[in-house]
Image (cartoon, rainbow, N blue to C red):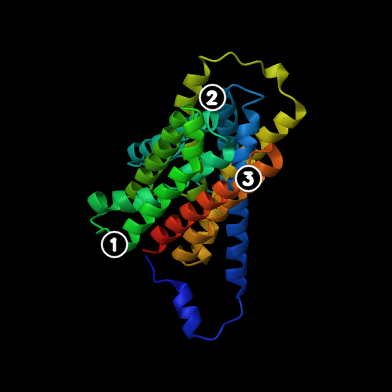
């Protein structure tokens, strides 16, 4: 990872922001806000639709939107030869398994807690990078794991003492973080060789298949969805599932990797406060302390 840019900022005069950096920060803000609001909006949708029917609808619509954008950009829509196996693997990890596990985490946990548990994924990416990429664990990464796990433990300790029903949600959140981290590490070792927007569309489409199979076991009353529910579906499909990935890719091109990785940590902050504002979920000292510990751990992992 690149050295901490803050150290250079202390040693050098502050330079005015360039146009590209301003655009990159704007793209990063859109990404973090889109992904952060996704958690309370998805939690609300669970009151409108069964969990996997909700995810199938959102992911399917998101895939269609991504393909439409890719077509408008002039990208080749059909994957290149030799990329299918890798494409299916990434879709299974980063979309299919991740979507199923985060949906289950939201079912058992408040959105504000599910987002904190799941956003430990950069820590696990650092852990997996040791055996898979040969990146030796550093003191910073070990400290990051301790901070991240400490934050999650603080978050759920009181809840578990009151009800053991939170444990499956925590385990699903951790599992979601692990599978996404695994996909990230594999992608670093063998990246997908295809246009980015088309890649998002195909991963969303393929990843929707196992979610749709689970949705077949549910009894869905499509006519019972309220106008607000349809608006929430449109939000999840267009912003977190599609547009946020485009702004994320753009931010990665315009900003240093360390800046982008740390900036996206605003997503769980947005998720926690949006859950309190939109859903009335508790926001006390315990939640804020857990959020701070987890974010410090993830930020340390991103810079180690």
At mark 2, the secondary structure is helix
Whether residue 126 is situated above or below residue 115 in the rendered picture: below
Query: Is 267 left or right of 280, judged from the image as shown?
Result: left
Q: Residue 158: percent from the left, percent from the top? A: 50, 38
At mark 1, the secondary structure is loop
* Residue at the image point whose x is 46% and y is 79% from the top: 8
Q: Quadrant of the N terminus?
A: bottom left
Q: CA distance from mark 3 to mark 1?
A: 34 Å
Q: How many marks?
A: 3
The mark closer to the camera, 3 or 2, is 3
- In the drawing, what numbered circle is on residue 138? 1
At mark 3, the secondary structure is loop
**N-terminal label among 3 and 1:** 1
Residue 74 visible in this rendered orientation of the protein = no
Query: Is 137 left or right of 74, judged from the image as shown?
Result: left
Q: Residue 134: percent from the left, percent from the top? A: 23, 56
Q: Which residue is mark 2?
A: 52
Q: Residue 284: percent from the left, percent from the top? A: 61, 47
- In the drawing, what numbered circle is on residue 304? none
Q: Residue 289: percent from the left, percent from the top? A: 53, 52
**N-terminal label among 3 and 2:** 2
Query: Is 100 left or right of 89, judged from the image as shown?
Result: right
Badge 3: how crowded within 10 Å, few (<14), some, or many (20+)? some
**N-terminal label among 1 and 2:** 2
Q: Which residue is mark 3?
A: 283
* Residue at the image point whose x is 75% and y is 25% from the top: 226
Q: CA distance from mark 1 to mark 2?
A: 39 Å
Whether residue 262 is situated above or below residue 195 in the rendered picture: below
Q: Nearer the viewer, residue 55 or 73?
A: 55
Asked if disc 3 and disc 2 are in contact, CB closer than 8 Å, the reply is: no
* Residue at the image point whose x is 46% and y is 27% from the top: 164
Residue 126 visible in this rendered orientation of the protein = yes
């Amino acid at each position: 990872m690149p050295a901490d840019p803050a150290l250079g900022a202390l040693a050098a005069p502050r330079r005015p922001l360039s146009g590209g950096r301003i655009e990159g920060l704007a793209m990063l803000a859109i990404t973090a806000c889109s992904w952060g609001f996704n958690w309370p909006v998805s939690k609300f949708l669970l009151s409108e639709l069964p969990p996997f029917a909700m995810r199938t609808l959102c992911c399917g619509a998101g895939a269609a939107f991504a393909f439409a954008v890719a077509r408008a950009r002039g990208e080749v829509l059909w994957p290149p030869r030799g990329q299918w196996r890798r494409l299916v693997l990434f879709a299974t990890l980063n979309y299919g398994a991740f979507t199923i596990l985060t949906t289950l985490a939201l079912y058992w946990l408040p959105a504000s807690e599910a987002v904190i548990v799941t956003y430990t994924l950069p820590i696990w990416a650092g852990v997996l990078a040791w055996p898979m990429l040969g990146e030796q664990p550093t003191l910073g990464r070990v400290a990051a794991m301790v901070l991240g796990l400490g934050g999650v433990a603080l978050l759920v300790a009181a809840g578990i003492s009151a009800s053991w029903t939170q444990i499956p949600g925590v385990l699903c959140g951790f599992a979601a973080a692990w599978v996404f981290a695994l996909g990230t590490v594999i992608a670093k070792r063998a990246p997908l060789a295809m246009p980015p927007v088309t890649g998002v569309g195909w991963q969303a489409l393929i990843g929707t298949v196992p979610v749709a199979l689970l949705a077949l076991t549910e009894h869905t009353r499509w006519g019972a969805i309220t106008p607000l529910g349809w608006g929430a579906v449109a939000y999840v499909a267009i912003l977190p599932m599609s547009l946020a990935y485009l702004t994320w890719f753009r931010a990665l091109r315009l900003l240093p990797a360390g800046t982008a990785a740390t900036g996206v940590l605003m997503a769980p902050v947005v998720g926690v406060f949006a859950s309190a504002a939109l859903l009335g979920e508790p926001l006390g000292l315990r939640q804020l302390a857990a959020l701070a510990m987890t974010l410090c751990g993830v930020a340390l992992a991103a810079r180690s």
